[in-house]
Every structure is written in C-alpha cells, then in structure tokens.
Image (cartoon, grey):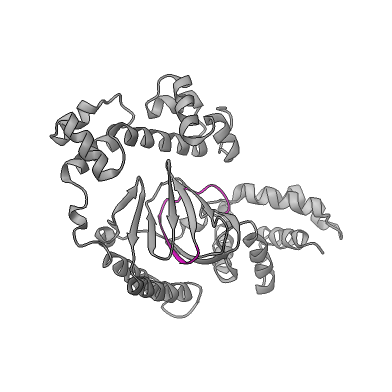
Amino acid sequence: MAASTAVARVLFALINGVDPGVADRNLAAAYFAETGAPVDFRSFQRFTDALILSLPQQHRLLSLVPQWQQAFGQLALTKQQAEEFIRQYLAALDHSLFVKLPLFVGKYAGRGRHSINFGGFGDTQVDSWLLVFTLAGTGYFRAGLRDYELTPTSVALIEPGTLTDFSGSQSAQWNFYWVVFQCADSWRSWVQWPLAGPGVRQLALNTDAADSIERTLSQLYSNFIDSGPLKAQLDHNLLEQLLLRCASCMPRDSSKALDSRIRAARTYIDEHFAADIVLEDVAAASNLSPSRLSGLFKKETGSSVMAYRNELRLVQAAQLLLHSNLRIADIGNRVGYSEQAFFSRMFRKHLGMSPRQYRHNFHAVDRSGR
C-alpha cells in the first residue's frame, strides 16, 4: 500500500472520531515530516490530541466525511484519490491549531533545503511568541522585508503577529528546537531582547550560554511530550527557566541599546505608518532636527526613517492579503497607499511579485479581491 493511501485512511478515521494508535500516528508523522512540517513522532502525538479535542469546531474538516464516505468505503483507494483527500484535508484543517495551545514544543532535524511552516501546515503567522534555537547547521527565515540567519551562536524570538517565511537549510542539515508560547505578564521584561528588525529579536550566545539553554530546552521538550503527573506545572516552570536563561544573556546595556529619542521615533512611526507622515513629523515626535534624526535613526536601526515606515506598510499589506478578504485596492488604502498602481509597484519592488500574485501563491483566505 502506498504511504499516501495509508495516511489518508488514518486521517479519515481520525475525523470520524477514531483515535489512531501509536503506529498510525507515527506513520502520519513520518509522512508530514517529508513536507517540511516541523514535527517529530512524539510532538505529532500532541498535535493529534489537540486536533481530536477541537474536532467539534473543525467544521470544514468534518464536511469532508460525507464527501469521501463512498471512496473510503471501497476496498481499494487509489493513490490519486488518497493524495487528493490529503490535499483537501490540509486545506480544511485549522492551520493555527499548533499555536492556539498555551505551549507547543517541537524538535526538528532537516536535511537539504526544505520549507518550515510553524502555523500548522500552512501560512506562517503565529499569534503567540515563537522561539527558535539552532542545535546544528544553519537555517534561514524572512520576516517583513528582511532576511535572517539562524545558527547555534544565536537564538531568535519572533513577536506575535509577525509574518514569517522559514526556508530551512540552504544546503546542509538543520537541527533545532522551536517553542510557541503565550507570554505571562510577569515575563514581559524577559522577552525585551535586542531588536534585529520589526517583530524579530535575537540574542548572541557564547558556548556556555548555548549549552545551558540547550539543556533547559531538552528538559522542556521531554516534559512536554510526557504525560506524567504535574505535567502542566512542570511545563510552566521549565518555560520560565528557559526565558530566564535567555534573559540572562541580554547585553548589560540592553536598556541603553536604543536611544530614547529613536524609541520615540519608532513608536510614532508604528502608530502612524498608514498616515501621510513626513520626516519632519517624526523628528518633532522625537525632539530632534530632521537631519539629526536621519543620521541617528540610520545608525541605531540600520534603516532610514522612511524605509522603516515603508517596511511596516508592506508587512501589514502582506498580512492582509493572506488573512483577509479585502480587495487589493482597499488593502493599499488601509496601509497608506491611495493609488493602487503605486502600491502594486512598491509591493513588487520589495517582495518580488505583485499583491495579486502574492495572494495567489500563498493561499489567500479569500481570493475575491484579486
């Protein structure tokens, strides 16, 4: 029996309320791991448990049962049928299921170039915090309009709502842990790592710090996939330890890492990026002259004032293209581009394709705005 046929039968049984056994779960985990989903056998168990609990709310998924009942009632399910069912299953699945949990921990070892999707098996927009720690090799991801590298000498923290594209390893194996979590109020100061770009924070690690964080992650992962007594309390405690160990690696002058006037400038841009603001507006908000602001902003952030504003506009536009059914012209207006032609030109310049192509290529929620 082809792997896709066996997996299709497991998935169909699952949405019929049948809890698959360990062997069937492992079969499905192995199949999806080939697609670049960051799951191993044991973390897939947790994903399946969460899916079973959420089935009453998975209306699109449940609608597949009557559509496919006859096909699965036959003794022989063709490979083509199986692959089509799996395609429809993944399209109907709530892709944010992973990240709707208070905590989800995974470990992944990839070989060769592959795509990593943290929002289940679909578009990657996490509404919780996402921490990625590289054990070996090199991974790459794009957030906003910037590219980032992930190596064992650093750890990355991605803020809620940041749209990311993980491309995995360019040429060699990439091993890493990933943690999706809700941040308790008491932990807020521990996640104020140095900003590497909009929505992305990174810490540089020495060997001792990396070893300490790896040990804590190993304990957190082992406890997360376990079902022992006081599991939830231990999960919470180990996650807290992890964030504390990372916070202890912050530069001692991290509170001074960004000039207070530049923080004020960025706050103003963050709140008014869709408005028709000019350099002088931002300068007034930061109590600097326009020329002084331009030089200091570039030095502190690596970006010009207007480039930073444009990046925020286009990141927000990309999110709306994927996660709303607004027309493209309306999205342009919402993020500050009143002329659709200019919006499309800016979008293509920075993201390499038109807004229409972007929405089509990345599986927009609703395509009526194309």
Question: In the displayed structure, would residue 273 be above or below residue 207?
Answer: above
Q: Residue 49: in sight, yes or no?
A: no
Question: In the displayed structure, would residue 352 be above or below residue 332?
Answer: below
Does residue 135 show up magenta in the picture? yes
**Residue lying furthest right in this view?**
75
Q: Position of residue 235 (x, y in %)?
A: 40, 72
Q: Residue at left 31%, top 70%?
A: 245
Q: Residue 108: in sight, yes or no?
A: yes
**Residue lying furthest left in this view?**
287
Left or right of residue 67: residue 243: left
Left or right of residue 344: residue 286: left
194 and 127: which is toward the camera: 194
Q: Position of residue 325 (x, y in %)?
A: 52, 32
**Residue lying furthest bottom in this view?**
229
231 and 116: which is toward the camera: 116
Question: For residue 149, what is the image quadrant?
Answer: bottom left
Question: In the displayed structure, would residue 26 be above or below residue 156?
Answer: below
152 and 38: which is toward the camera: 152
Left or right of residue 102: residue 265: left
Does residue 333 show up magenta in the picture? no
Q: Residue at left 67%, top 51%?
A: 89
Residue range highlighted in magenta: 121-137
Left or right of residue 97: residue 196: left
* Quarter of the image where the C terminus is located: top right
Q: Residue at left 21%, top 48%?
A: 258
Q: Position of residue 231 (x, y in %)?
A: 43, 75
* Quarter of the image where the N terminus is located: bottom right
Number of numbered tags placed on the structure image:
0
Q: Residue at left 44%, top 21%?
A: 342
Q: Position of residue 179 (x, y in %)?
A: 44, 63
